[in-house]
Image: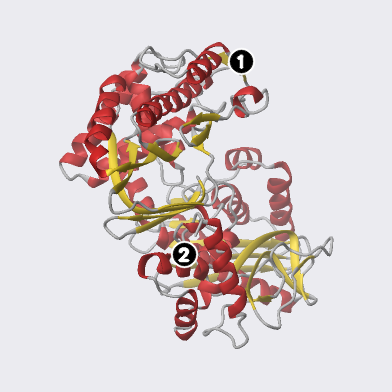
Amino acid sequence: MNLENPIALDCENYPNHFLISFKSCDGSHRTHFELRGESANFTRAQIAEIDAYFNEDVTTFGFNSLNYDLPLIALALDGATAKEICDLGNDIIKNRKRSWQVLKEYGLADLSDDHFDLFEVAPGVRISLKTYGARMFMPRLQDLPVAPNTTLTAQEMDTIKSYCENDLDTTIELYNQQRDQIQLRHDMSEQYDTNLMSKSDAQIAEAVIKAELGGKVKRPQKIPESVAYRAPEFIKFENEDLQGVLEQVNTTVFKCNRGNGSVILPKALRENKITIGKSTYQMGIGGLHSTEKSQSVVPNANQLLCDRDVASYYPNIILNLGFAPKTIGPKFQKIYKSIVDRRIEAKRNGDKVTANSLKITVNGSFGKLGSKYSFLYAPALMLATTITGQLSLLMLIERLEKAGMSVVSANTDGFVTLMDKDQWQLYDDICFAWELDTNFELEETRYAGLYSRDVNNYLALTTDFECKGKGVFADDGLLKTPVAPICRDAVKTLIMYGDALEQTIDKAIENGEIERFTVVRNATGGAEWGGVRLGKVARWIYHKEGKPIKYVKSGNKVATSDGAWPVMDLPHKVPDGLDKMKYAEMCRDMMKDLGL
């Protein structure tokens, strides 16, 4: 594949209109091919011109293009009319057909040799291109301007072309933000001689392990009714309540969901509150978590606040305890250890490509343990990994609390401890002894403050004066839908530098940073404001003359939209009338959530 300047593609189809649009990443090339009229089809010259985009000298990409756009294009190249192409599009959507099904059923050519799809590569699950556009602060958020299966006028066809160009711009920006991931997949594809360009991390892990096994491996034929767990011998507790928890998980029958094959956590375990010291913990299928709310922890001059995470926690549990899916057997341990060892060696030698590719394999494979569609499906193994991780952390927390230290937060693979400075050596000794008992390794970060709405939403200020956030306090990115980022930024700036909330807000207004004031929300069925249709992804700011956004179908108010002023097209400056008091109020509410 040629990744120097790949070309984005997108299609739009109606009963009397089919459009294929191409645009290069650097903007130097843009072409549209159209069919206007139900019986229209491409000429031989047009077919040859379109077909040229799918030769080995050109690399194309799209969003959800493997299962939708490419089959439509293949049918168009086969001489189909606009109406026939539209019928295929409806068939794909209605019956949720995959590309291989469509190509086989319709006898179409596979155009995917030099094409990749961003749908699985981009982070998140089943996220629309419009939502990614909002997360990337694209200048325009535009929903499909004419309902599907409408017979279009000539003017509407021109409107659809403009809409398609905007989607191409969003697709290109999504590619730009995922360049490293695409390049990594390209390198891995060459290394393993298989096409990994359009696969998620978990899918890549599955493909790599399959390649390491030397061929096809059958997935399990059925979902077990239930699985059991038995803790390893190193799990030991002194507290009677914790001993009771251990006995409970060792004797519990964990049922499996008959539909998706996932393990179900029994109600007794799910609702069991485990108290150690001043903190309370809950177990879950995914991992342990503490239950603090609106908590602010700042060490005084005589204290330390230390965060320790277990390095590669779940992969090391799998290796240390010799876990292996029954479909593979002992070979799995050998292959998995080889991958982990090669990654460590690559990191040591500065080989980032190999190290990063193997990291995907090591971490991504765990997700497939719970997928009934994977040859790695092993619900008992998945359960044993997560429960062992939770019990191991509880064992260490018990030891630290018994020694007079306070664990103030814990989640999945790490915990935060408040202690007196003269307790640090004892703290380190206890952690080291736990590492010897479990064969795990801890990594430490010191905090100057931890400010938590809850265990999954917090700001942590390190002693190196870095502020990291999680959940609603995380930095903007492809995994986070904007909810007035200026509020998070203002609170962070207050914590780090002592700047007044209003000072940060005023500076952003002065700099014209309109995107930092935006709020985005998905609106099922579409949203409207004052009779103006906004689409399924609504974006607004709070304005003194604003009013609620409503759902088109029900007329109900979209949550948190009181005072909304839509900005589906981002203005070049912050509009006059921005409701500064509303944003300041949101900041103060956020501070209360953080225990400030």
Using the rendered view, name the quadrant where residue 19 is placed: bottom right
Where residue 253 appears, as percent x and y from the top left, is: 60, 14
Q: Which mark is residue 172?
A: 2
Disc 1 target residue: 226
Along the horizontal axis of the image, is 208 left or right of 223? left
**Looking at the image, which is closer to me, 522 or 485?**
485
Q: Is residue 116 visible?
A: yes
Along the horizontal axis of the image, is 433 left or right of 42? left
526 in relation to 78, above or below: below
**Looking at the image, which is closer to me, 555 or 31?**
555
Q: Residues within 10 Å of mark 2 (few under 14, many from 20)?
A: many
Disc 1 from disc 2: Cα separation: 46 Å
- For this orientation, the residue located farthest to the left is 349
Residue at image point 24% right, 34% down: 428
Where residue 514 appears, as percent x and y from the top left, is: 52, 78
Mark 1–mark 2 CB contact (< 8 Å): no
**Looking at the image, which is closer to me, 330 or 146?**
330
